[in-house]
Image (cartoon, rainbow, N blue to C red):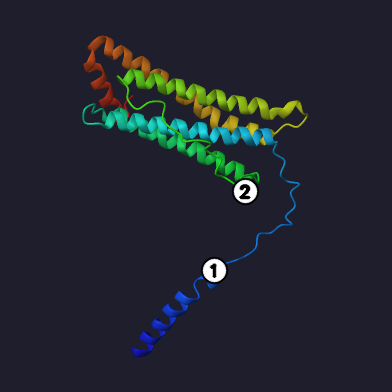
Amino acid sequence: MKLIYVFLVTFLYINGSLGNKLKCTVPLTRDVPNAWLDMANSCVDLLKSQVETEIKAAMTYLAMGAHFARDTVNRPGFSKFFFESASEEREHAIKIIEYLLMRGQLTDDVSKLLSSRVLPLRETWSNGVGALTEALELETNVTKHIQDIIRNCEKPNNSNFNDYHLVDYLTGEFLTEQYKGQRDLAGKISTLGKMMTAHGALGEFLFDKKLLNNEV
């Protein structure tokens, strides 16, 4: 027992006095070939900008989710839907960052991925229709940004270079999901509008219950 105690005291002393000397100081490799780094700078910049676009959308959805979760509003279905939408947008931003890393980018300073303080478009909404309508406008804007990246990276700076992989990745991984999401939001707006026309404010309450149970 005494031997174990002595060992622990000795270990703690060494760890405390030599802590800084025990840090890993493996130097960065400087001679890695870079011929495989073939992304056009303009495409890299556009993808970095898209990260901020996705994060801004996520922040707006978080604000929507928080708004409808307030006790004075109390629409748990809307809150759940928008919080889930925020998570999806955050995942999109992560996917873009992972893609840039796969292509050998973001190896230096990543502090400029978010150029400024990212804030939601607003913090309160008058009703569910207004929030869903703004969500559809937001998704349409995100889709247009992705389409702009695709157009620019097919022939960046009017060159003969075509980033086939990036274009295919954005088309298959992002655009299909964007179009499905836009159609889903348009359908929700239509259904909620009809329910409110028929039942007034009660229509939003009933729609919220269906939204909470994934019935619409």
Residue in the picture at 35% in, 18% down: 130
Determine the secondary structure under disc 2. loop
Residue 12 visible in the picture: yes
17 vs 39, nearest the viewer:
17
**Closer to the camera, 67 or 146?**
67
Residue drawn 25% across and 26% down?
A: 209
Looking at the image, residue 155 sits to the left or right of residue 115; the answer is right
Instruction: Say which amino acid is labelled 2.
Output: Asp
Residue picked out by circle 1: 23
Give the residue number, with chain letter if any, for mark 2. Answer: 108
Mark 2 is surrounded, within 10 Å at the Cα level, by few (under 14), some (14 to 19) or many (20 or more) other residues, namely few
Q: Position of residue 40 (x, y in %)?
A: 70, 36
Q: Position of residue 167 (x, y in %)?
A: 64, 31
Q: Secondary structure at mark 1?
A: loop
Residue at x 75%, y 25% (from the top left corner): 158
Mark 2–mark 1 Cα distance, whole angstroms, equals 22 Å
| Residue 131 point in image, percent of width and height | 36, 22
Which residue appears farthest toward the right when viewing the image? 160
Looking at the rendering, in which quadrant would you find the C terminus? top left
Vertical relation: 206 (above or below) 29 = above
Residue 45, percent from left and from top: 63, 35
